[in-house]
Structures are given as C-alpha cells and as structure tokens.
Image: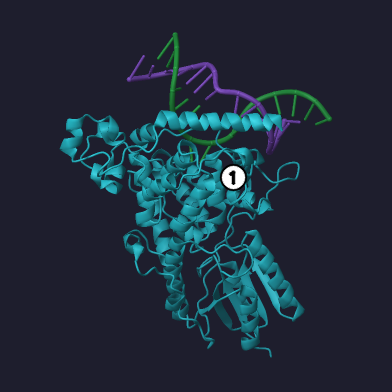
Chain colours: A cyan, B green, C purple
DNA sequence: TTTTGAGTTGTTCGA
DNA sequence: GTCGAACAACTCAAA
C-alpha cells in the first residue's frame, strides 16, 4: 500500500500557484486526487449567492482545465462534505487529505468533525492557511485579546508582516480515474432567464484572469490609488481583484508581494503612500475575518447589542425600489443597477447605497446584507457582514450614528464627471451636470429637453433627503433612550 | 491600575 | 464661496 494516493480538497482556493495545501499534497510524492465538493447540505452552511455561483462555474472550469494540462482531473462531487469525503476514501484508498482552512463557524465545525473521523480511521488530515495574510487568532493586542479597532490592527500588521516566499505550482498532477459529476449538471450558470449576460464582458474568472488583473492593476491603477479610489466614474480607480480573492484564485500573499515589489521598483514610479493605502484595504479584509472568527453570528446578529432595540421600518415597496435601483436618487440607483448588471459595485457607492437603505429608509441592514450576498460576484462572508454593520452603525469600530451620507452631494463629489450615473441610469444621460444628481430640482424645460418625465420614466425620490436623514437621527435618539433606561 | 489619546470613508450650520 | 466647529458618548489599546 505504499502508493496510496492523497486527496487535495479544493474549497475557497481555486488556484494552483501559492496554494499550501496543494503543495503539501504534491510534496508527499504520492498520486494526488484533486477534489471539489459543492456542499450546501452540511449543518449551518450558507449556500453561495446566485452571482457567486455564476463565478464558481467559470472558476471551476478554469481550474479543471489547468489540472488537465498537468495530466490530472478535477473530481467534482455534490453533497455534505463528510459523507462525500468518506465515500472517496473508501473508493480511492487514499491515505491523507489536504485542505486550506476557512473561518466560518459551521465550516470549522464541519472540518473538525471530518478531521477527527479521518484520524480515527487511520487517515492523515492536514490543513493550511491559504486565504489570509494572518489567520484571525495570530495577531493579539498587548493584553492578549483580538483587535476590535482597525487602525491599531493595521499598524500591527504593517509593522510586522512580511510575505513568505511564493509557493510554486506543481508541474504535474498524475492522472486519477475517479469519476466526477458533470459541472453542467450543477446548474450554477443561470438559465430561464439568463440574467448573467451583462457579467461576462467585465470578468475573467479563474487563476489566469486573476494574475492578469493584478498585473494590469500594478501598471494602471496602483500608483494613483489613494487619490482615485473613491471615483466610480474613473476607470481603474480600484483593482477589481475582489472576486478573484473571494474565490481564492489568487492569494493575498501574491498581491502583497507584488505590490511591495512594485513600490521598491523605481522604474514603476509608485508613490509609497498610494500603495500603502491599497495594502490597507487588503488588511480590512483580514480585519473582517478577525471579527467574524470571534463573532460567528456576524452576518445575522448586531455586533453592538444596543442595536437590538433599533426601531427599524418594514417596507416591501421601499426594499424593492432599493434593490431595483428605482429610489429616485441617481447615485443610489446607478450603484444598484451596476450591481445587478455586472455583479459588482464600486466601494464608494456601496457605502452610499448602504447608508441610504439603513438610514434614509431605516431598514435593517440584514436586508442589504442578503441582497449583496446574492448579487455580488465577490461576496465574502466576513467583509460583507462586517461592512454592512459598519455602515449601519452596529458594527465594531463603526461609523458614528450621525454620519448619514447625502446621496446628492456624494454624487456630485465622487461622480464629478457624471459618467457613472449616465452609464447605469441612461434615462438621465441628457440631463446637465447641474441637475444630474437631483433631477427633481431641474426646471420643467430642462427635464423636457433631456427627455426625463419624473414619475414616468424616472421615479420621484421615495423619501426626501432631509426628512429621511432626520428620521434616522430620531431613531438613534430613541435607541439611546432605551439603552440608558436599560 | 489608571490615564490618555484616538477612532476609514460625513453633513450641516453659521461666521 | 470657504472654513471650522458641532454633532455623543464610548470603547479600545497602549503608555
């Protein structure tokens, strides 16, 4: 039995480069069986949203063909991971399983149970860090706890972190003849209707797409990141790496190394502060994982329990208008439509639409969290939950309650050219800049000339800014009263 | 143990 | 038009 094969279990790490679990599996010198399990059945597991499944479909195709190029074959299986793994062990006689860790509580529990079961039956199980620069339990404050404020966390990372050497991809993955599900049978790509048609022009899922995107970013965006990052109307104002990172098609170490090298390469002419700001965004992702790891219910429960008393509104109509990009606020609507059309939204606009939902409409952040989870190709269990709570004010180190984004001035400031609104809300394209972010203020003859009929081809605002803002501030006052009374 | 300074991303108002 | 202050109070992290 000296040639018992080993299993490399791919999860949120769909890449061959810089993949510690894969490397360790290959380094055994034994035949490696690469496996991906679509697990929506294990207890407490949250299924991916529809947009993420679209991406997963393409990413698995890419990984699969890369493995075939190395003489192997990716084995696809569907079902609760534990029985699937057990069945595979029996079928293949594998002597070890390798994987990279994930950090959601239900997955940790599932994986721990699998590890125990494997060990009982004499099979080795090895897990690795394949998704984070620093795993959530590794960075502690001076007094031994985990950080709850970003800035000191960032300072600690920046002062101490240096990326390890890259891990090379295997040059062969000797064939296995284990049968695989057909990817097409999983129905990850939407049909009837295929709402994903708008996605394809924007994305190239898979490891090559990720590495190309990084390269493009280093050449075209990184050097001006700090000054452009809030401008959704400017191309390359952000990296666009988030969906690749969310699927593990590229490791954060690869990004960190490439950016640090670019900073030190004089020919690239990358100002240090611009690049450090970009790296800090990578560390925001890590900070979100710290919060998620220590607060497993982050996507459902208020981090700050005071918010359990928040007098949220319930309005199906308002929620629908927000989701569909029909709020009457051009900047909000542009963002929501960009999300629907492309599976992604610029970060500045995410804050604007999130503030609008939780403050102007006074709707619970979980509605937004769920919509984003379903619509974003980059949806991430930690970032999505932590960011929604941050905006709502219930999160760790959250925005102060009185910070209510004004969708009109935010639009004028960050969509200065108006290109963003004109692109995603074409019915307003002919409005002059002066009224683009507040069409209800335009005189009749201006609206007429631009072909805009408020209430007909573009909605009136569903809530007046001033009233919406005041209603939110009043709600926070009530919240405070409840807390003081308690 | 106590103290101190600080905390991603904003808005409004009045001088 | 520009600018600074007020908008709260609290918790965190480190000295």
Seen in the image, is A198 located left or right of residue A134?
Answer: left
Considering depth in this image, is A132 or A59 the residue closer to the camera? A59
Residue A346 visible, this orientation: no
Residue A25 visible, this orientation: yes
Residue A263 location (% of width, % of height): 47, 47
Residue A28 location (% of width, % of height): 64, 78
Seen in the image, is A117 located left or right of residue A211?
Answer: right
Considering depth in this image, is A36 or A468 the residue closer to the camera? A468
Q: Is residue A220 above or below residue B12?
A: below
Q: Residue at x 50, y 39 (%)?
A: A362
Q: Residue at x 34, y 58 (%)?
A: A202
Judging by the rendered image, the residue that carries numbered circle 1 is: A158
For mark 1, give the secondary structure.
helix
Which subunit holds the residue at mark 1? Answer: A
Seen in the image, is A12 located left or right of residue A111?
Answer: left
Residue A189 location (% of width, % of height): 40, 69
Q: Is residue A420 above or below residue A6?
A: above
Image quadrant in which the N terminus of chain A is located:
bottom right
Considering depth in this image, is A138 or A28 the residue closer to the camera? A138
């Amino acid at each position: 039995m000296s040639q018992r094969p080993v299993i490399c279990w791919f999860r949120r790490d769909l890449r061959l480069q810089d993949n510690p679990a894969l490397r360790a599996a290959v380094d055994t010198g034994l035949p490696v069986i690469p496996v991906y399990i679509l697990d929506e059945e294990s207890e407490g597991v949250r299924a991916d949203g529809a947009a993420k499944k679209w991406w997963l479909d393409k990413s698995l195709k890419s990984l699969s063909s890369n493995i075939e190029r190395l003489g192997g074959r990716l084995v696809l299986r569907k079902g609760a991971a534990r029985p699937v793994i057990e069945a595979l062990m029996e079928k293949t006689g594998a002597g070890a399983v390798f994987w990279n860790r994930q950090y959601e509580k239900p997955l940790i529990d599932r994986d721990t149970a699998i590890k125990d079961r494997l060990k009982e039956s004499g099979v080795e199980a090895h897990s690795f860090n394949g998704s984070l620069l620093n795993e959530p339990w590794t960075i502690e404050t001076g007094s031994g706890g985990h950080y709850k404020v970003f800035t000191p966390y960032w300072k600690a990372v920046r002062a101490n972190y240096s990326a390890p050497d890259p891990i090379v991809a295997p040059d062969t993955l000797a064939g296995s003849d284990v049968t695989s599900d057909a990817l097409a049978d999983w129905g990850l790509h939407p049909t009837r209707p295929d709402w994903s048609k708008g996605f394809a022009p924007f994305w190239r899922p898979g490891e090559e797409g990720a590495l190309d995107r990084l390269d493009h970013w280093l050449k075209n965006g990184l050097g001006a990141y700090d000054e452009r990052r809030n401008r959704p109307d400017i191309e390359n104002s952000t990296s666009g790496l988030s969906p690749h990172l969310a699927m593990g098609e590229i490791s954060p170490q690869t990004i960190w190394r490439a950016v640090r090298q670019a900073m030190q390469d004089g020919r690239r002419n990358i100002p240090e502060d611009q690049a450090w700001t970009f790296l800090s965004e990578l560390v925001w992702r890590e900070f979100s994982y710290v919060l998620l790891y220590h607060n497993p219910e982050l996507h459902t429960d208020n981090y700050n329990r005071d918010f359990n008393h928040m007098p949220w509104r319930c309005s199906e109509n308002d929620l629908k208008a927000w989701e569909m990009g029909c709020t009457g606020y051009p900047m909000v609507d542009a963002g929501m439509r960009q999300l629907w059309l492309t599976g992604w939204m610029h970060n500045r606009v995410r804050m604007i639409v999130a503030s609008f939902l939780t403050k102007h409409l006074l709707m619970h952040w979980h509605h937004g969290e769920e919509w984003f989870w379903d619509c974003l190709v980059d949806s991430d269990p930690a970032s999505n939950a932590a960011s929604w709570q941050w905006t709502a004010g219930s999160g760790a180190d959250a925005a102060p309650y009185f910070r209510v984004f004004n969708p009109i001035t935010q639009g004028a400031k960050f969509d200065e050219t108006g290109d963003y609104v004109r692109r995603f809300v074409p019915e307003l394209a002919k409005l002059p800049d002066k009224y683009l972010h507040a069409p209800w203020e335009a005189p009749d003859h201006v609206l007429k000339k631009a072909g805009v009929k408020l209430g007909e081809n573009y909605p009136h605002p569903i809530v007046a800014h001033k009233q919406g803002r005041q209603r939110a501030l009043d709600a926070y006052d009530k919240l405070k009263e409840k807390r003081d009374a308690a």
